[in-house]
Amino acid sequence: MDNILVAATKNQVRSLGAVLSATFALRSSRRTLGLIEELGGLIFMAGGMLALRVMTGAPTHHGMPMAPFLLSGLITFWLFRTTVAQVSNLQSAKATFRSNPRITSLDVLLAKAVVNIFIYTCIGATAFAAAYLTGHSPGLERPELVLVLCLLMGVWAFGFGLCLGAVYLYVPSLKVVVGGILHMAMWLSGIMFLWPEVPYMGRWFFAANPLFHFMELLRDAYFEAYRTALGDWQFLLTVVFVTLALGLMLERVVRAKAQEQTQRPQEETDPFTENMV
Amino acid sequence: MLRSLWRNLPGRRMPLPRFGIGDFRLGRTANDDAGTGVVPLPVRSRDLLRGHGSIEFHGVSKALGLSGKRVPVLQDMNAIFPRGRVVGVLGASGSGKSTLVQLLTGNMRADAGRIVRGMSVSWPTGARDIFRRELTLRKNVRIVSGLYGAWAPDMLEAVKEIGKIRSQDLDRPLSEVPADLVIRGTASLCYALDFDCYIADDLLTGGSKHFRDHFKELFVERKSTHSLIIVTKNIIAYRELCDDIHLLEGGTLRTFANKHDAIQAFKTGDRAKVLD
């Protein structure tokens, strides 16, 4: 029994390694324009927000330089948004490896999430280093916490994506609604503002918004100048692990349904060979 | 390193039982037209077989399509595909050949029943989508070798040798090389990975006639130690290669006393559309 368990574990590790390698190679070998498009949105948003703040004569925000303040929030939110988009497509997850029985759709989704988290963590590190080296940002106060928060955001996005993917199988039109909600969520996630600026009547909403907790803790870990009064690690960890557990369970429950939609019976007769004997 | 992990499982170290045609019992026999049901295996044989070099189908059923419009493809199918035999499965269009292949390879789960795989099973040898077209042949071989726990440099050498692929073609994206080269690459890697059982879906492999003949010769060499299951509607090309031929009809397998009878039954059947 132990040997079988060890063998199964080794097989799983090999499968995951192979899918990760393939997914990374596929992502990096994709047309250059695709990557530029993906990053273009991020750069455009960051540039626009930054220009607005500079033009209005506000180069700092509560003592935090504007460039790293906006970049940290935007990159983390982009990490969330793109991971959710990649993971929530349960139907086509296995398509890339459809002839390979050792690879499950969960392996593929996990690999996609890992690669996406890795790419955005690298983008974040590059952007923060560039801002620091050009004198636009102080050094990260607690870089390890910033890294942990990025990874945690990725894990949450993975779980959230799985939950959404399961729901999309039954209500495909919900994709459009969720797309709109994610756009709204960006403006309500605290990319451009902090807890002290939140109006009193809306505080209940932001106190229950995990994205806002992420942003608050991120600014706390990044800047010496800011200490959050809201960011709660316990709340965040609970949300992340409950979402992840729910997502993994839902994915397993709806896997057959997802595959059902891609497997169809053949025609009883082949119209091209019907008269050939 | 070349072998898959199945080799290391405890059961694999035991001596493998040998089977004759008489032991190879499938769901229904040709003489079982009255539909008396499944011919069960003796319990003793069943214990001996399980996990020791055969693929067993026990009451396997599978339906395809969206819920509400599901079409039963296989119904309560019982079959044993033993090690060391070349088995042909004949079936008309829409009889469930592709579903059977998917179930054999483990790519699809049965709705009911149980499938026991006591052998490592290949992907369909003629499958072209094992490799990603965006990546190079070298990268693809590395990825698939890693998946099956094989040593990638050895696999690359084997692919070059079996598929007669030049080194310069290894580093070009597959979208830029001829389709024939991709087919040679996937088929060669499948052979090099040394599975216990190879599954062929209609074509043993694609590509040029010379390569197909070469590949067929390679399988003839492995005939005594490996299994080959050819699921097709055109058995003529592989009639000589097969030890047994069975008919996939009405969602289950019918066995026959000899290959000729199976082919005749297929040709004269209501839905016989064999390309002769």
Image: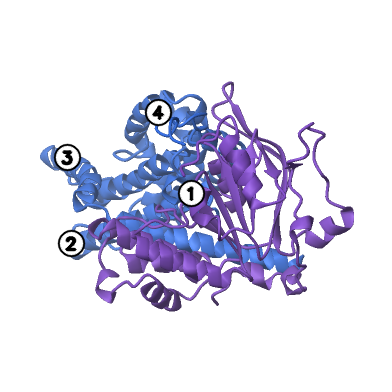
Chain colours: A blue, B purple
* Disc on the earlier residue, 3 or 2: 3
Report, in whole angstroms, how far the alpha carbon at label 3 lies from the one at label 4.
Answer: 27 Å
Q: How many numbered discs sit on the rendered protein? A: 4
Contact (Cβ within 8 Å) of mark 3 with mark 2: no
Report, in whole angstroms, how far the alpha carbon at label 2 lies from the one at label 4.
Answer: 41 Å
Residue designated by label 3: A48
Residue B9 x %, y %: 70, 69
Query: In front of the other: label 1 or label 2?
Result: 1
Answer whether residue A146 is visible to the viewer in this image.
no
Q: Residues within 10 Å of mark 2 (few under 14, many from 20)?
A: few
Report, in whole angstroms, how far the alpha carbon at label 3 lies from the one at label 2.
Answer: 20 Å
Assign a secondary structure to mark 1: loop
Horizontally, residue B234 falls left or right of residue B117, namely left
**Amino acid bearing label 4:** Lys
Q: Quadrant of the N terminus of chain A?
A: bottom right
Residue at the (32%, 71%) spot, across then down = B165
Residue at the (43%, 40%) spot, across then down = A92
| Quarter of the view holding residue A41 | top left
Query: In front of the other: label 2 or label 4?
Result: 4
Q: Residues within 10 Å of mark 3 (few under 14, many from 20)?
A: few
Assign a secondary structure to mark 2: loop
Residue B25 x %, y %: 76, 50
* Disc on the earlier residue, 2 or 4: 2
Name the mark on residue B101. none
Q: The numbered mark 1 sits on a residue in which chain?
A: B
Query: In front of the other: label 3 or label 2?
Result: 3
